Image (cartoon, rainbow, N blue to C red):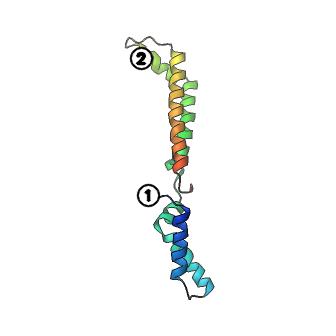
Amino acid sequence: MGAPLTKTVLAAAVEDALRSTEGLPMPERLARAKASVLAEPTVARATTPISRFRSETLQGVAGIGAAQLLNAFGVTKTLVIAAGWFGRSWNPDEVSTVLTTVVSLALAAWAWYGRETASRPLG
């Protein structure tokens, strides 16, 4: 993923850009400084949009919704009933609720991880 964009990294990029454009007329100096800052690898990575499908936060939220829908339509109960064919005797309602809760908590952690490590805007 690379180094995160911090105030220190951004300040250093701006200082370098301003130093490299000294003596130029103001409009040209601003344009070159802006291009120089945006070309710095950490800044470029942080300002490059990513697709919504690559966002861990949206993946987690969509997965939680899917888990709840699967539970609502009885898919998780079907899996528990199918396990009964192999000698397991569990209560389908209880197991499906526990299974959905565990999956939802894991996906919530994935969404939180995505939010904490986000360094680029969604595109």
Tell which of 48 and 3 is nearer to you: 3
Of callouts 2 and 1, the N-terminal one: 1
Residue extending farthest to the front is 8
Q: Is residue 89 left or right of residue 64?
A: left
Task: Count neighbours of disc 1 (C-alpha within 10 A) and say few if under 14, some if 14 to 19, many if 20 or more.
Answer: few
Q: Amino acid at mark 2?
A: Ala
* Residue 27 visible at all: yes
Image: 71 above or below 120: above
**Residue drawn at 54 percent across, 34 percent down:** 66
Disc ID at residue 28: none
Give percent across and percent down for residue 15. 54, 75
Say which quarter of the image contains residue 69: top right
Q: Quadrant of the N terminus?
A: bottom left
Image: 20 above or below 85: below
Residue extending farthest to the right is 26
Q: Marks 2 and 1, how far apart in space? A: 44 Å
Residue hosting label 2: 83
**Residue drawn at 51 percent across, 28 percent down:** 102
**Residue drawn at 51 percent across, 81 percent down:** 20
Image: 84 above or below 22: above
Give percent across and percent down for residue 58. 55, 44
Residue hosting label 1: 2
Q: Amino acid at mark 1?
A: Gly
Q: Quadrant of the C terminus?
A: bottom right
Give percent across and percent down for residue 113. 51, 44
Q: Secondary structure at mark 2?
A: helix
Q: Secondary structure at mark 1?
A: loop
